[in-house]
Amino acid sequence: MHCYNHADRGAVGTCKACCKGLCAECAVDLGFGLSCRGPHEQRVTEVEALISRNASVQRVAGRAKYAAPAFCLFMGAIFTGYGLLSSSELRFIVLLGVGFLVFGAYSLVANIRAFGKGG
Ligand SMILES: [Zn+2]
Ligand SMILES: [Zn+2]
């Protein structure tokens, strides 16, 4: 591949915005990729910022995927234990606790499937 601007020079890479071949003189190294000189420098920088912002949002979501199921399992354990230790009038709390446990386990499995094991 040759430089888009200099047909006699070999390209060192391509612009991330327009995919044109660029020689060392025409290319701008932005640290995460190359851009041709001009408006594409700004554009490639913005796209990269957007991608890294999305990536960090997904990392947070990956951590949060266990929070709600863990909370349900925790509440379920408390209700079940409290209901079992209490008088017979409070035995319905055991059912509530089991409901929380089932829901927590279900959403845990559903979240793992939805997000994938790699997070
Ligand atoms: Zn370009
Ligand atoms: Zn060039």
Image: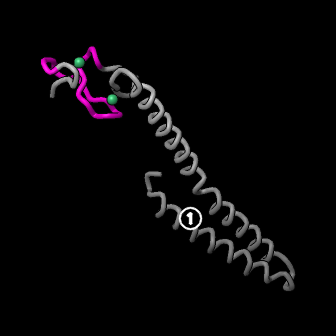
Kindly identify which residue carries mark 1.
108
Mark 1 residue type: Leu
Please identify the quarter of the rendering in which residue 37 is found.
Answer: top left
Q: How many marks?
A: 1
Q: Is residue 63 left or right of residue 93?
A: left
* Foreground of the two, 7 or 108: 7
Residue stretch in magenta:
7-26
Q: Residue furthest bottom?
A: 88
Q: Is residue 86 left or right of residue 43?
A: right
Residue 112, horizontal then vertical, whole percent? 49, 61
Residue 15 drawn above or below residue 23: below
Residue in the foreground of this view, choosing between 99 and 13: 13
- Residue that lies at the very extreme toward the top in this rendered image: 25
Q: Residue at left 55%, top 45%?
A: 57
Which quadrant of the structure image shows residue 78?
Answer: bottom right
Residue drawn at the location 70% of the way across and 63% of the way down: 74
Examine the rendered structure and indicate whether residue 82 appears above or below residue 37: below
Q: Is residue 90 left or right of residue 63?
A: right
Residue at the location (19% across, 19% down)? 6
Examine the residues drawn in magenta and state their main secondary structure. Answer: loop
Q: Quadrant of residue 29?
A: top left
Residue 13 located within the stretch drawn in magenta: yes
- Element carrying mark 1: helix
How far from the left and from the top, in percent, is residue 30?
40, 23
User: Which part of the image, by quadrant, shows the N terminus?
Assistant: top left
Horizontal and vertical percent for residue 11? 20, 23
Q: Residue at x 27, y 14 (%)?
A: 25
